[in-house]
Amino acid sequence: RTQLVRVSADDVGIQVVEGAFKPEEKNDEILECMAKVLKVRNPQMQVSKGWSNSSRLLIVQDVNKREVYQRLMTAVTDTKQYMVKAAAADAKKELAAQAMSKVAVVGLNI
């Protein structure tokens, strides 16, 4: 699953689903993800080369910078909350399994 992992004033970190992608396929994957995040249609966006092989420039039409930033921040916050909930559920299952074996090992990610 392609998702946002960080947003800063300088750039946006996006994790593209693993697989052997050609550059244009990776761009299509990025456009699909960003269309959902930014709530725009694909024709309103264009991906072009960035400053390195792993960077891209995303041009968005009909949305101002502030709206783009707010939508990106909302999406990355929602992603982090989902990941925390998933990790908590996994930890709960792990603790339940450990309680059955009477061994206490707790891993914390801070």
Image: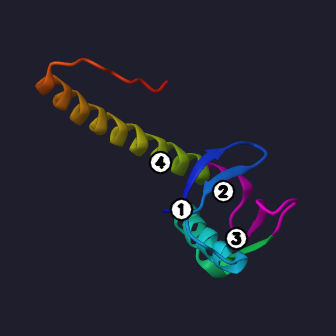
**Label disc, if present, on residue 2 of the rendered structure:** 1
Q: CA distance from mark 2 to mark 1?
A: 18 Å
Q: How packed is label 4: few (under 14 Cα within 10 Å), some, or many (20 or more)?
A: some
Q: CA distance from mark 3 to mark 4?
A: 25 Å
Q: In front of the other: label 1 or label 3?
A: 1
- Is 61 colored magenta in this rendering? yes
N-terminal-most mark, 2 or 4: 2
Stretch of the chain drawn in magenta: 49-70
| Amino acid marked by disc 3 | Asp
Residue 7: x percent and y percent? 66, 45
Q: Nearer the viewer, residue 81 or 70?
A: 81
For mark 2, what is the residue?
68
**Label disc, if present, on residue 23 of the rendered structure:** none
For mark 4, what is the residue?
79
Q: How packed is label 1: few (under 14 Cα within 10 Å), some, or many (20 or more)?
A: some
Residue 54: x percent and y percent? 76, 60
Q: In front of the other: label 3 or label 4?
A: 4
Residue beneath the point at 14% across and 24% down = 101
| Amino acid marked by disc 2 | Val
Is label 1 in a helix, a strand or a loop? loop
Q: In front of the other: label 3 or label 2?
A: 2
| Amino acid marked by disc 1 | Thr
Q: Nearer the viewer, residue 7 or 100?
A: 100
Q: CA distance from mark 3 to mark 2?
A: 10 Å
